[in-house]
């Protein structure tokens, strides 16, 4: 099972990244767990300074932008 974390403070881009990540995972047929991380200290522990960010299985895959659905599919496989 994949573990996804959306790092951000609940901004519109953070919500968009969450929705696109869920859509990508469903389209790929992945089993996943998704967690939203809004605590600034926890976000900084990942070395992320600009949100939103997508973490897949403990690794930051993208930060500071919302990738396209196709890009997210490549990042989460």
Image (cartoon, rainbow, N blue to C red):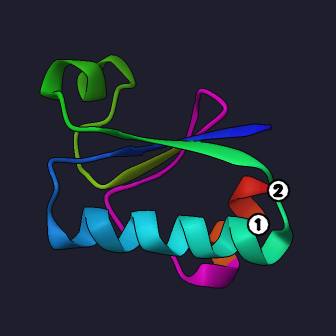
- Tell me which residue sits at (71%, 65%) in the image: 25
Dot 1 crowding, Cα within 10 Å, few <14, some 14–19, many 20+ = few
Up-down: is 64 above or below 38?
Answer: below
Circle number at residue 31: none
In this rendering, would 24 be left or right of 50? right
Q: Which quadrant: the N terminus?
A: top right
In this rendering, would 77 be left or right of 76? right
Question: Spatial distance from mark 2 to mark 1, Cα to Cα?
Answer: 6 Å
Name the residue that disc number 2 marks.
Answer: 77
Identify which residue, 23 or 56, lies in the foreground.
Answer: 23
- Tell me which residue sits at (54%, 82%) in the image: 68
Q: Position of residue 46 (x, y in %)?
A: 39, 24
Q: Is residue 58 magenta?
A: yes
Q: Range of the magenta residues?
A: 56-70
Q: Position of residue 26 (x, y in %)?
A: 72, 70
- Tell me which residue sits at (17%, 28%) in the image: 39
Up-down: is 59 above or below 22?
Answer: above
Q: Position of residue 23 (x, y in %)?
A: 61, 75
Q: Which quadrant: the C terminus?
A: bottom right
Q: Position of residue 33 (x, y in %)?
A: 61, 41
* Mark 2–mark 1 CB contact (< 8 Å): yes
- Tell me which residue sits at (45%, 72%) in the image: 19
Circle number at residue 74: 1
């Amino acid at each position: 099972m994949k573990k996804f974390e959306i790092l951000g403070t609940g901004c519109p881009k953070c919500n968009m990244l969450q929705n696109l990540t869920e859509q990508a995972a469903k389209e790929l047929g992945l089993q996943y767990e998704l967690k939203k991380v809004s605590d600034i200290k926890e976000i900084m522990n990942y070395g992320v300074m600009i949100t939103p960010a997508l973490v897949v299985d403990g690794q930051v895959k993208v930060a500071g932008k919302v990738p396209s659905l196709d890009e997210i599919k490549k990042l989460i496989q």
